[in-house]
Amino acid sequence: MPSRTGQGPPALTVLGGPSFDSFYRREFPAVRAVAWALTGNVWTAEEVAQDAFLRAHREWERVRGYEDPGGWVRRVAINLATSRLRRGVREVRALARLAGRRTEDWHMPDSSREFWAAVRSLPRPQAAVLALHYYEDLPVADIAAVLGLAEGTVKAHLHKGRDALRKVIRPAGEATR
């Protein structure tokens, strides 16, 4: 409903944190990107990100007071992505086939697609850490906060994930052993 000035209603800002609208506009693209890095499907990533923000909206009175509400919603998105993948490989394959009929709304070089496909093949904790580190460019301390892990655990997942990726991804021209 328009206000007396003819403009739309003002965004509600609650003391103790940002309005949900401004939080959503600021964080949604990055959360969707992390979900895509983990699921490999733009449509699934969109759903996962929307579900994570729906949960944040339902709990906004509590979440807005957190030191890092963005970290909370990323963690929810990562958990939702992991749960979705666990529910069934068939569902994911069917969605991937359907998504192949449409173009993605961002373009990624083929070399990056190979990298993210390799990341998705890793154990979920390693994939989540690598997605936050390489896609969002988060430092170890921030990744630890988002995932609720010790920094040493994040470093271990980074190390193991990088080692695993080295075994499956070879630079162009390098012969496999």
Image (tube, rainbow, N blue to C red):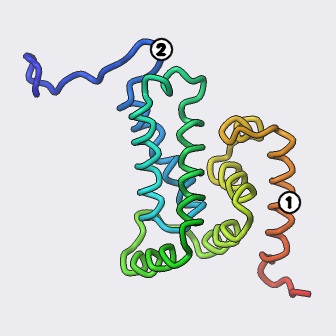
Q: CA distance from mark 2 to mark 1?
A: 39 Å
Front residue of 57/30: it is: 57
Q: Nearer the viewer, residue 64 or 164?
A: 64
- The quadrant of the picture occupied by the N terminus is top left
| Position in image of residue 74 (x %, y %) | 57, 43
Q: Position of residue 116 (x, y in %)?
A: 64, 67
Q: Secondary structure at mark 2?
A: loop
- Tell me which residue sits at (48%, 39%) in the image: 27
The amino acid on which the numbered mark 2 sits, given as a three-letter code, is Gly
Residue 105 against residue 26 in the figure, above or below:
below
Work out whether mark 2 precedes mark 1 in sequence or the reverse, and give the earlier one. 2
Q: Position of residue 87 (x, y in %)?
A: 54, 67
- Give the number of marks: 2
* Residue 3 placement, left or right of 61: left
Vertical order, 15 against 19 (above or below): above
**Quarter of the figure with residue 88:** bottom right
The amino acid type of the residue labelled 1 equals Lys
Residue found at the far front of this picture: 87
In the image, residue 85 above or below residue 3 = below
Label 2: which residue? Answer: 16
- Residues packed near mark 2 inside 10 Å, few (<14), some (14 to 19) or many (20 plus): few
Q: Residue at x 42, y 57 (%)?
A: 46
Q: List the residue tagged with mark 1.
A: 160
Q: Residue 166, how many percent across, how many down?
A: 84, 70
User: Relative to 108, is 12 on the left or the right?
Assistant: left
Residue, far right: 177
Q: Are marks 2 and 1 in contact (CB under 8 Å)?
A: no
